[in-house]
Image (tube, rainbow, N blue to C red):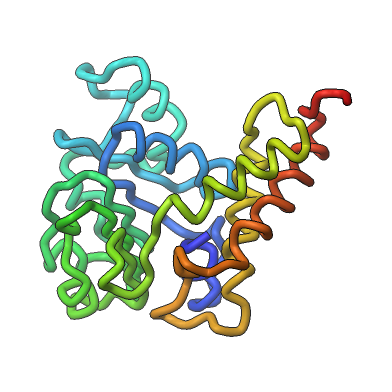
């Protein structure tokens, strides 16, 4: 949701973005899966060793699968290599990313530094390095990205539709609903609703329910 609106601010389509995900644990893998489903094909996922690629011989099954489906540019080596010229950084690693590494990204980059309580790169440093839009997982900075925006509505929608499972389309529909709530208030410091916005859960529930019906995953009454 946040990335959709951040890209819109710069007049960019999601499919045109080159994205780097810092962190290849459960969060990083799930994020990369959702980005792929959303039509972003140019994604590099990095763990503490570096970029996931089929050439590495130290990857377990989950990372090996991710390596086969991402990194179409064939980047090797550490995270800083992947960041050069990238449009988007999504940090879910808890590591530290330097101001210089952010400065090597494409002009008007998007930086989501989501580690808590210490972001991978401080928002002030990211802006100073040239980032146009910055988000964190914290409530004391603009653009808090928090999964509480999604969970209540997705499960409400799944229950309403009697869905047997949560599909990728349900998750994408929820993301679009969250993004749409921002509406005309969209700005570099407001790309996603706050967790206290009462409009979010009903909008997500309706979108998730409709997607479940469209996907044919609903139990019969």
Looking at the picture, how far across and down is residue 67, in whole percent?
37, 29
Say left or right for 176 vs 101: right
Residue for point 76% across, 31% down = 162
Say left or right for 201 vs 157: left
Q: Is residue 153 above or below residue 24?
A: below
Q: Is residue 11 above or below residue 89?
A: below
Residue for point 17% across, 39% down = 77
Q: Quadrant of residue 37?
A: top right
Is residue 192 visible in the rendered structure shown here? no
Using the image as rendered, state which of residue 118 and residue 45 is in the foreground. Answer: 118
Looking at the picture, how far across and down is residue 22, in whole percent?
26, 46
Using the image as rendered, state which of residue 74 and residue 106 is in the foreground. Answer: 106
Say left or right for 39 vs 91: right
Q: Quadrant of residue 55?
A: top left
Residue for point 17% across, 55% down = 117
Looking at the picture, how far across and down is residue 187, in whole percent?
47, 82
Residue for point 29% across, 16% down = 60
Q: How many numbered callouts?
A: 0
Is residue 147 visible in the rendered structure shown here? yes
On-image quarter of the C terminus: top right
Q: Is residue 120 above or below residue 140?
A: above
Using the image as rendered, state which of residue 84 and residue 153 is in the foreground. Answer: 153
Looking at the picture, how far across and down is residue 160, in whole percent?
75, 40
* Residue at the outermost right position: 221
């Amino acid at each position: 949701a946040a990335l959709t609106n951040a890209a819109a601010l710069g007049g960019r389509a999601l499919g045109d973005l080159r994205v780097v995900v810092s962190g290849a644990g459960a969060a990083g893998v799930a994020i990369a899966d959702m980005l792929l489903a959303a039509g972003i094909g140019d994604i590099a996922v990095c763990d503490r060793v570096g970029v996931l690629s089929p050439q590495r011989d130290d990857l377990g099954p989950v990372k090996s699968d991710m390596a086969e489906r991402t990194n179409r540019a064939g980047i090797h080596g550490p995270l800083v290599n992947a960041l050069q010229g990238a449009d988007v950084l999504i940090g879910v690693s808890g590591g530290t990313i330097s101001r210089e590494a952010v400065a090597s990204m494409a002009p008007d980059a998007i930086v989501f530094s989501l580690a808590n309580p210490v972001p991978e790169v401080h928002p002030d440093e990211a802006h100073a390095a040239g980032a146009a839009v910055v988000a964190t997982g914290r409530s004391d900075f603009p653009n808090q990205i928090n999964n509480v925006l999604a969970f209540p509505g997705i499960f409400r929608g799944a229950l309403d539709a009697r869905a047997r499972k949560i599909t990728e389309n349900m998750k994408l529909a929820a993301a679009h609903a969250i993004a749409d709530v921002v509406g005309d208030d969209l700005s570099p410091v407001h790309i996603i609703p706050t967790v206290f916005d009462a409009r979010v859960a009903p909008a997500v529930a309706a979108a998730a329910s409709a997607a479940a019906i469209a996907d044919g995953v609903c139990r019969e009454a």
